[in-house]
């Protein structure tokens, strides 16, 4: 299928051939008929992409601070790699989509339904149910494509709470502004529109608004005073996009006492306290389509808000807009300025970025025959057929870590890269082309069913690992699973049982830190010493949001299972003996820290008497080293900071080992696994150790949460 993509590196847009996405649980799969280009958001993204690195940095100062903090801890080289990788990945454009449902894995929708959603500019999109709404009869597909933009304006109106007869100003008469004008008029408000563009002002007048053009020398404040009959306007809704502070300042000056100002667009926010203080004005920023926006439980998990408590969610705002269209109260036909076929999507984006006048730009899509198969597999390159048993690799998952670290590691190790799979298809094509895969897909069956693929690398979300490991083993493949192996004791038991039946199939978890060059040196120094060790591993993990998927036990397993398993394995490796006991203490619950099981002290005891203390902490400062490993043994000390500097205290002939760039062992880990697969060496990590570490990680996560899960 065709999809419109944009490069964040240089701002260019392309229409790419992408495998159709999968329909996930709680989602609908939609055959697109038309989509609307968002003149504001998508123009801003194109302009951002066209800027140089300095311009990009100036536009995102908060991101610059994160980059500087990362450089201080991980080193400049690793940080530059991460930034370049992020900018290298294409962005799927669009969020105003109309089409027919071809598959539904949720309640409320069925194949054949005509719906609007915030899907991308693509022939087929997969969208969560709460971001969709059924289109009433009598509303055309083209009209319905304006629904999402209109919902943004509607949410601003709901926050302004206008009543019949009130005087409301709309500053900025782009698409959202003109839609807002119509909805305010439908609510019985008097409307004054402000813009510099005569054509847009003319449209606003046609929709029943009075207008003022500051570009023609008209006095905004005087016009607003006359419009409000000297009382001051009741509310101002700002839908403009400008760096200037004038829209907010003018809004404050034209409002009556206790007037309301709602920011829907993007403007300068240097506010004058005096303007707001004397009139007791209220100012609020509107969040996109309405309640539910950016809430993963609502948008991805499908958990609706009870209508008795949240009357207007983003989905219900969609429905309200569609009802206005069905009733004839919202006319979008005059807002359509251009139409392009998706094949000409690049021309549409060129027009958007140009100085040529445009308003609503529509993209149309070819309609396949009914029951036409959905293509989820795209060939990328041709070459000689690989011989099975020679490290022919298929990747399940093509996220940021896979594309930036794992795939390059396997390529450097000599793997024959066959197929790469991602649920949406975009990243699989991007990384597939970049690293020379022969196929890209969105269906795991493309890898599992391919006879020529003998090795599967699993780099998906944690909750998918167990099922995919089992499926790959049962398909006769060798398996490399990026940690963790699984999330529950039952899953681990099933994997162990399956692996025991298949001694000739190799299974490995990506515990890469034991392969880092400085850890290899530490292991060599420790090897001749016959004495128990004290191992202290301090992980300054950094806080992440409580609703991030890694924090959700059923999805990411929590950070102890999902991330701290690395350090359980590292301690097990350095100790060199089985774990015999474990004790976990999590930080006490506190209102300032909704998640406590990522602030944990974990103690391990080993069969030789060694003890390891792992401090996995999300409540530290980013300026402190992210990972510090210390080993105390026989009157000597080893200290490794951030996989950059290893120092020895009391070691004859060894004082330090410093790297110019961070190396956590990912490439060596991939090479060791491929050597096992191709019969060049034995297992890189003993299977019993993998299961042992996984078992203790799951138990540690359970103890940290204080549950029996």
Image (cartoon, grey):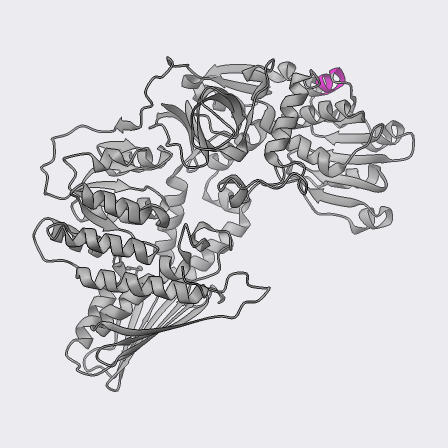
Would you say residue 483 is visible in this rendering?
Answer: no
Residue at 20% over, 34% down: 449
Q: Nearer the viewer, residue 234 or 6?
A: 234
Q: Position of residue 166 (x, y in %)?
A: 84, 30
The quarter holding residue 538 reads: bottom left
- Quarter the C terminus occupies: bottom left
Q: Which quadrant would residue 366 be assigned to in this image?
A: top left
620 relative to 458, above or below: below
Q: Nearer the viewer, residue 669 or 226?
A: 669
Residue 391 visible (yes or no): yes
Q: Position of residue 579 (x, y in %)?
A: 26, 72
Quarter of the image where one finds residue 476: top left
Vertical placement of residue 56 versus 680, above or below: above
What is the magenta range?
201-206
**Residue in the foreground of this view, choosing between 631 and 588:** 588
Please name the predominant secondary structure of the magenta segment in the image. Answer: helix
* The N terminus, quarter of image: top left
């Amino acid at each position: 299928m065709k999809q419109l993509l944009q490069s964040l590196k240089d701002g260019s847009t392309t229409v790419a051939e992408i495998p159709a996405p999968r329909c996930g649980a709680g989602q609908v799969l939609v055959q697109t008929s038309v989509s609307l280009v968002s003149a504001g958001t998508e123009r801003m993204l194109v302009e951002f992409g066209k800027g140089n690195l300095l311009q990009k940095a100036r536009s995102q100062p908060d991101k610059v601070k994160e980059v500087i903090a990362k450089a201080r801890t991980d080193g400049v080289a690793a940080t530059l790699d991460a930034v370049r990788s992020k900018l290298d990945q294409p962005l799927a454009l669009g969020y105003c989509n109309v089409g027919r449902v071809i598959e539904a894995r949720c309640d409320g929708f069925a194949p054949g339904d005509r719906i609007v959603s915030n899907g991308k500019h693509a022939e087929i999109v997969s969208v969560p149910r709460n971001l969709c709404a059924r289109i009433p009869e009598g509303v055309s597909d083209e009209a319905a494509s304006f629904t999402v933009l209109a919902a943004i304006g509607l949410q601003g109106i709901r926050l302004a709470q206008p009543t019949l007869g009130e005087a409301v100003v709309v500053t900025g008469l782009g698409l959202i502004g003109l839609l807002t004008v119509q909805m305010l008029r439908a609510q019985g408000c008097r409307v004054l529109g402000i813009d510099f563009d005569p054509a847009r002002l003319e449209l606003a007048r046609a929709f029943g608004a009075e207008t003022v053009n500051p570009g023609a020398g008209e006095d905004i404040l005087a016009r607003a005073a006359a419009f409000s009959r000297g009382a001051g306007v009741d509310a101002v809704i700002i839908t403009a996009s400008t760096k200037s502070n004038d829209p907010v300042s003018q809004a404050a000056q034209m409002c009556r006492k206790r007037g309301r100002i709602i920011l829907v667009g993007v403007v300068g926010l240097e506010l004058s306290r005096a303007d707001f203080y004397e009139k007791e004005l209220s100012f609020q920023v509107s969040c996109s389509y309405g309640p539910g926006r950016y809430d993963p439980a609502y948008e991805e998990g499908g958990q609706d808000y009870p209508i008795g408590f949240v009357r207007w969610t983003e989905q219900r705002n969609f429905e309200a807009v569609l009802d206005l269209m069905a009733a004839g109260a919202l006319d979008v036909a005059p807002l359509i300025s251009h139409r392009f076929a998706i094949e000409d999507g690049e021309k549409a984006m060129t027009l958007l970025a140009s100085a040529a006048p445009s308003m609503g730009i529509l993209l149309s899509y070819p309609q396949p025959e009914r029951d036409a198969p959905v293509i989820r597999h795209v060939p990328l390159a041709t070459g000689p057929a690989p011989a099975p048993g020679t490290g022919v690799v298929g990747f399940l998952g093509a996220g940021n870590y896979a594309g930036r670290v794992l795939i390059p590691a396997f390529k450097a190790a000599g793997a024959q890269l066959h197929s790469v799979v991602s649920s949406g298809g975009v990243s699989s094509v991007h990384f597939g082309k970049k690293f020379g895969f022969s196929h890209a897909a969105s269906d795991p069956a493309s890898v599992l069913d391919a006879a020529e693929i003998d090795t599967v690398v699993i780099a998906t979300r944690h909750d998918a690992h167990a099922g995919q490991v089992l499926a790959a083993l049962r398909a006769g493949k060798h398996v490399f699973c990026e940690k963790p192996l699984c999330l529950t004791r039952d899953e681990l038991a099933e994997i162990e049982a399956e692996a025991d039946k298949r001694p000739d199939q190799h299974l490995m978890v990506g515990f890469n830190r034991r392969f880092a060059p400085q850890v290899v040196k530490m292991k060599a120094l420790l090897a001749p010493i016959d004495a128990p060790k004290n191992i202290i591993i301090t992980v300054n993990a950094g806080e992440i949001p409580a609703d991030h998927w890694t924090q959700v036990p059923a999805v990411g397993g929590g950070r102890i299972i999902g991330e701290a398993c690395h350090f359980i394995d590292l301690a097990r490796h350095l100790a060199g003996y089985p774990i015999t006991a474990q004790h976990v203490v999590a930080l006490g619950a506190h209102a300032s820290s909704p998640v406590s099981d990522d602030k944990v002290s974990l103690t391990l005891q080993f069969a030789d008497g060694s003890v390891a203390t792992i401090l996995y902490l999300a409540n530290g400062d980013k300026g402190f080293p992210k990972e510090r490993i210390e080993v105390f043994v026989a009157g000597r000390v080893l200290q490794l900071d951030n996989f950059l500097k290893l120092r020895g205290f009391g070691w004859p002939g060894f004082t330090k080992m410093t790297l110019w760039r961070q190396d956590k062992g990912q490439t060596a880990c991939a090479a060791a696994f491929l050597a096992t697969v191709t019969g060049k060496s034995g297992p890189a990590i003993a299977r019993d150790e993998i299961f042992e570490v996984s078992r203790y990680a799951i138990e540690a996560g359970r103890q940290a949460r204080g549950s029996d899960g």
